[in-house]
């Protein structure tokens, strides 16, 4: 069994475990509240999805797939985790759910208007994945990714010591990785989130219901909006990034 296959099997085992746990457990390690701002911006980039073919890669607990369906998109979800697909099916029967590896998708070329993924790119071969996504995305379509960034100083320490996924050795996105994405898409942009506010993220799982945490997070995010405009060079050290890619290069 080669290295790629072994890693894939470890990822399947890990995410099947994650999605088989209680909702409370999942919220502690995959907290929606900390992503709300990023996801709202991602949805803004996606725009109107009514009657469009939308592929979500890695639906997780299925909440976003249900949201897309309710907005009248024709939703396809793929994942290597059967548990994720099962949970999504329990929430709504309308999305088309397929066990499939994003690095070897079984779709025809130019199929989707929108491709969306949240916390995906750290677990895959970026070059091969972008090649596949650019292949199945329509020439007029858009791909949007919500991802953790690599170089936030507190994130580096937290992920190496306390994070539940540390043994998976995820390859968090860096600015250098954006060059790979640009190889496959002619129009790209990105926006970073949570530099100062990212410093409190590790404490979320100890007290997400603490009012002081919510107040502190909101306050630091307001500071971030000004601070990052004054010091744009610090964007690469934020905790999260939203990437949009358009106009796929099919000949790569």
Image (cartoon, rainbow, N blue to C red):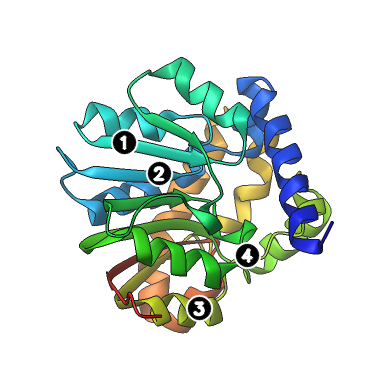
Q: Residues within 10 Å of mark 2 (few under 14, many from 20)?
A: many
- Pick whichever of labels 4 and 3 is earlier in the sequence: 4
Q: Position of residue 147 (x, y in %)?
A: 51, 58
SS state under label 4:
loop
- Pick whichever of labels 2 and 3 is earlier in the sequence: 2
Q: Is residue 244 above or below residue 114?
A: below
- Which callout, 4 or 3, points to the residue nearer the camera? 4
Q: Which quadrant of the figure contains the N terminus?
A: bottom right
Mark 2 → mark 3, Cα distance in angstroms: 30 Å
Residue 234: mark = 3
Where is mark 1, residue-wise? Answer: 75
Q: Which quadrant of the figure contains the C terminus?
A: bottom left
Residue 56: mark = 2
Mark 4 → mark 3, Cα distance in angstroms: 17 Å
SS state under label 1:
strand
Q: Residues within 10 Å of mark 3 (few under 14, many from 20)?
A: some
* Nearer to us in this view, 35 or 140: 140
Q: Tally the numbered discs.
A: 4
Q: Position of residue 66 (x, y in %)?
A: 35, 27
Where is mark 4, residue-wise? Answer: 172
- Pick whichever of labels 3 and 1 is earlier in the sequence: 1
Q: Position of residue 114 (x, y in %)?
A: 28, 52
The answer to whether one can see residue 95 in this image is yes
SS state under label 2:
strand
- Which callout, 1 or 4, points to the residue nearer the camera? 1
Mark 2 → mark 1, Cα distance in angstroms: 7 Å
Q: Residues within 10 Å of mark 1 (few under 14, many from 20)?
A: many
Mark 1 → mark 4, Cα distance in angstroms: 27 Å
């Amino acid at each position: 069994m080669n290295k790629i296959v072994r890693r894939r099997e470890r990822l399947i085992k890990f995410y099947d475990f994650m999605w088989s746990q209680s909702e409370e457990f999942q919220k502690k390690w995959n907290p929606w509240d900390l992503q709300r701002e990023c996801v709202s911006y991602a949805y803004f980039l996606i725009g109107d999805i009514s009657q469009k073919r939308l592929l979500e890669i890695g639906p997780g607990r299925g909440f976003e797939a249900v949201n897309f369906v309710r907005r009248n998109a024709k939703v396809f979800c793929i994942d290597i985790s059967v548990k994720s697909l099962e949970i999504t099916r329990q929430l709504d029967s309308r999305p088309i759910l397929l066990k499939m590896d994003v690095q070897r998708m079984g779709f025809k070329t130019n199929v989707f208007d929108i491709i969306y993924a949240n916390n995906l790119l750290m677990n895959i071969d970026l070059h091969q994945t972008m090649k596949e996504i650019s292949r199945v995305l329509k020439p007029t379509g858009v791909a949007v990714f919500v991802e953790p960034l690599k170089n936030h100083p507190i994130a580096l320490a937290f992920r190496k010591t306390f994070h539940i996924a540390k043994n998976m050795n995820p390859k968090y996105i860096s600015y250098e990785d954006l060059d790979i994405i640009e190889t496959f898409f002619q129009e790209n942009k990105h926006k970073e989130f949570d530099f100062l506010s990212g410093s409190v993220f590790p404490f979320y799982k100890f007290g997400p219901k603490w009012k002081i945490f919510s107040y502190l997070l909101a306050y630091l995010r307001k500071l971030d909006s000004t601070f990052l405009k004054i010091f744009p060079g610090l964007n690469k050290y934020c905790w999260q990034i939203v990437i949009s890619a358009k106009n796929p290069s099919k000949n790569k």
